[in-house]
Image (tube, grey):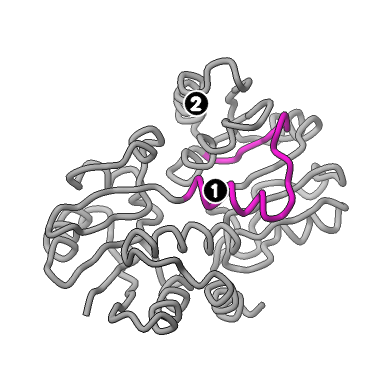
Amino acid sequence: MKVCYLIGYPVGHSVSPAMHNAAFRKLGLDYRYEAASVEPGSLAGFLNGVLRGPTARGANVTIPHKISAMMEIDAVDESAAAIGAVNTIVNDGGVLRGHNTDGTGALRALKESAVNLTGSRVLLLGAGGAARAVAHAVALEAGSLTILNRSPRRAVELAETIRGKAGRRVEVAAAPLDEAHLREELGRADILINATPVGMHPDVEETPVPKRLLHGDLLVFDLVYNPLRTRLLREAEEAGAEALSGVEMLVYQGAEAFRLWTGREAPLDLMRRVARRELGG
């Protein structure tokens, strides 16, 4: 049996084990998916002591390891190198290869929901691993991208990276994540993407954006998928905005990771049903 892991801290909230194990069973694959709670100081030991082992096939990587994991593996694909973060690792005979399926997962979630990114004004909250992937993907089609982050330096660094990759195709800006900048940027944004963990279980009553700043001309995409309807999404709908749950990105990025591990196309409908069931939806 081959084992795939979810590496993060904490990981008790994740529905990925149920989602992937259902997919493995559906296709009759001798695989198992397990959540591994790995504290930041223990990441190198887990990767080298467990993930390189003969029964390990790979892993998904989540908060807080998406950036630091790059330093501990043997190779990364072109997309992950450009993004500067990995969310998927494949063990090829003891060689650990990193990939990033977050950006393609987010882009597919938006497009499958009939969102037209072309020329749109996107406001992205966060500058961590998931935000980096989403920023690179969105910048390929959006008209403008503004990144707000509690640490302005990280937002500026990400904006400079995107600007260097995208050239003149997209206008990129960065600023601190505070109410003044939220008010200013939301007033002209078409799409709001939350790539911070604010509102994630168990802190379900937290939100990165005060309700009074939301409006009906927005599409609000929250990458947080647990709970299924975050406070941000609930209040966006109450303000008349369109809301898109992070469970869609979860399914699409998970399906691409599944393909990398197994060489098989994932049963998307099953994965979505299981994820929603686990989340009470």
Q: Based on the displayed image, in which of its 4 quarters is residue 235 positioned? A: bottom right
Callout 2: SS: helix
124 on left or right of 56: right
The residue at the point 88 percent across, 53 percent down is: 240
Please, what is the three-letter code of the amino acid marked with disc 2?
Answer: Ile
The x, y position of residue 197, in whole percent, is 53, 53
The local crowd at label 1, few if under 14, some if 14 to 19, many if 20 or more residues have their Cα within 10 Å, is many
The foreground one among 19 and 231 is 19
Could you tell me residue 174's position as x and y percent?
Answer: 58, 25
Question: Residue at label 1?
Answer: 196
Residue 188 percent location from the top left of the image: 79, 30
Q: Which residue is disc 2 drawn over?
A: 162
| Between 49 and 164, the one nearer to me in the picture | 164
Count numbered badges in the picture. Answer: 2
Work out which quarter of the rendered image holds the C terminus and state it.
bottom right
Residue 248: numbered disc: none
Magenta segment boundaries in residue numbering:
102-126
The residue under label 1 is which amino acid type? Thr
